[in-house]
Amino acid sequence: MDSATQALLDSYRALLDAACVAGRERLHKTGLDMAMLPDTDQFRFEQQADPYTGEPTLNGRWSLDGSQRRAQLVINADGSLLLECDLLCPHPAYEGRWAEQLSIWGRDRDNLKSEIALLAELEG
């Protein structure tokens, strides 16, 4: 990782850590394994220019070897974060539904939002 990307990562570390806490809390409340959300040190980070403003954004990607599970995150130049992580497992509270994805978003580390998207179980 280049020094500019590392500096950006360091500046957003508290927000990234708060996003992981918020995500794990959502998984726990839902009855899913909190380990389904990877630690941010497992992401590969890169800096990209925002296509509109040209300002730097921090982008991270993670994938589980031998699996279709993936996670990605972006922190925009305005400090807003979006982290999405594939879950792809039966939802413990909704028979016939799958927990498709965990999403975490916001810019205030003390007030991040999270949700788990549901997917109808496929027949066949």
Image (cartoon, rainbow, N blue to C red):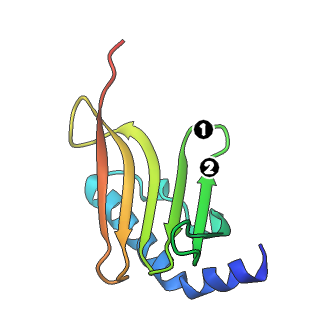
Single out the residue that lies furthest toward the right: 2
Q: For the residues labelled 1 and 2, say whether their Cβ atoms are less than 8 Å apart.
A: yes
Percent of width and height locating residue 53: 52, 75
The residue that label 2 is drawn on is 63
- Mark 2 is surrounded, within 10 Å at the Cα level, by few (under 14), some (14 to 19) or many (20 or more) other residues, namely some
Percent of width and height locating residue 95: 22, 32
Which residue is found at the position 45% from the left and 70% from the top? 20
| 93 with respect to 108 (left or right) | left
Near-viewer residue (15 or 21): 15
| 36 with respect to 91 (left or right) | right
- The dot on residue 41 is none
The residue that label 1 is drawn on is 67
Above or below, 2 relative to 39: below
Q: Quadrant of the N terminus?
A: bottom right
Image quarter for residue 68?
top right
- Mark 1 is surrounded, within 10 Å at the Cα level, by few (under 14), some (14 to 19) or many (20 or more) other residues, namely few
Single out the residue that lies furthest toward the front: 52
| 18 with respect to 97 (left or right) | right
Percent of width and height locating residue 82: 43, 65
Above or below, 29 relative to 9: above
Which residue is found at the position 63% from the left and 63% from the top? 43
Circle 1: residue type: Ser
Q: Could you tell me which secondary element the residue under label 2 belongs to?
A: strand
Above or below, 63 relative to 105: above
Circle 2: residue type: Ser
Which residue is found at the position 62% from the left and 70% from the top? 49
Which residue is found at the position 21% from the left and 38% from the top? 94
Q: Quadrant of the C terminus?
A: top left
Q: For the residues marked 1 and 2, what is the alpha-carbon distance in whole angstroms?
A: 8 Å
Q: Could you tell me which secondary element the residue under label 1 belongs to?
A: loop
**Badge count:** 2
Image quarter for residue 99?
top left
